[in-house]
Amino acid sequence: MAAKINKLKVKNSLAFAMFILLLFGCSEKFEVIDDLSSTKFSLVDQTNSAREFPKLTKGKLTVVGYIFTNCPDICPLTTNNMRMIQEKVREAKIKNVEFVSISFDPLQDKPETLRKFTEVRNLDLSNWTFLTGEKPVVDSLMNRIGILAVVSDSTVFKDGRKIYYYTHTDRIQLMDEDGKIRKNYKGSEINVDEILNDIKSLD
Amino acid sequence: MKKIVLILFMAGIVFGQTTKKSTISVNDPWLRPAAQGANSAFFFQLVNDGDKPDTLVAVKFAHSEVVELHETFKKENDMMGMRAVKNVAVPAKSSVMFKPRDLHIMLIGLTKDVKIGESYDLKLVLKKAGEIKTKAVVRDMPKMK
């Protein structure tokens, strides 16, 4: 009898330990990396309408990507990965998710540039917004969330025009309903199933 | 008789030249979509079946102001960048992949929209093999393997 009780105690202890592990494991996975809930960045979207970040997606989970449109490799990969996440979210019938792509190159990426960038890729903008803005505002946002973008290379055209390219942080972030950044991913090589599971966990 | 021999000899030279097979070939060429004025990237596998190495020195594209050979590189803290390279060596009996997050051809300052589903002619210029023509399709991603 005593042996049975001891066995039961061990079982209960194990179950309790598992519960604690699971509880702390989950919260650790989604610790708050940065709380943007009290911040306000006045930006414009691809239609040149004024938008406030992160307020524009308050109450929804948000997948945020960081790009510049002259980027030939990493940023198109990040954008395409966001498109694939959007498709997976739709297939999973999760409705509480928004997508935001923010340019860290506001001098070259005007709203019209962003609009063309979305059109040529046939992107679904029903829950996806592209943002740019005044350089000081964009710089302060990037500085706040830890996105580095350093001009590294350039091309000069025959007529003297010059475009430049950045060495930059390769990043997609998952932001919760309250504007808190909960997880960082490599934008160009994100595991789409991983972020989908994270979205389901936070939803 | 002499004339006939000469004609046959000349025909042999011409025929030989036109049927000489290049040892360089291009597999799975594709471009990224991009709007007029923006930049695209061109990806492919460059195969050298010959016994001698060759070098890719340029690419010609009719719908961009500039074409450059580039490579993407990683830095610390998830930083990514890219830089121009002068040329790309293709060793004998070998191949080089131009692929996302790696070597690519930058098509800078497009003179028209390059849209998904379209296809475009490009020419690769190699030191020994000369110009190699190819046709690339426009798509978002490499083919899934």
Image (cartoon, coloured by chain):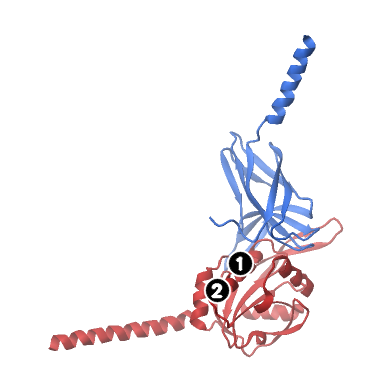
Residue located 69% across and 66% down the image:
A121
User: Which quadrant is the N terminus of chain B positioned in?
Assistant: top right
Q: Secondary structure at mark 1?
A: strand
Q: Is residue A179 left or right of residue A51?
A: left
The residue closer to the viewer here, B143 or A110, is: B143
* Residue under label 1: B79
- Between residue B114 and residue A17, name the one nearer to us: B114
Asked whether residue A30 appears in the rendered view, the answer is: no
Indicate the position of residue B81 as horizontal and vertical percent values.
65, 62
Which residue is most to the left? Answer: A1
**Residue B126 relative to residue B142: left or right:** right
Residues marked 1 and 2, same chain = no
Inter-mark Cα distance, 1 to 2: 32 Å
Q: Which residue is mark 2?
A: A91
Q: Residues within 10 Å of mark 2 (few under 14, many from 20)?
A: few
Q: Colour of chain B?
A: blue
Residue furthest top as drawn: B1
Q: Give amino acid for label 1.
A: Met
Chain rendered red = A
Q: Residue at x 73, y 23 (%)?
A: B13
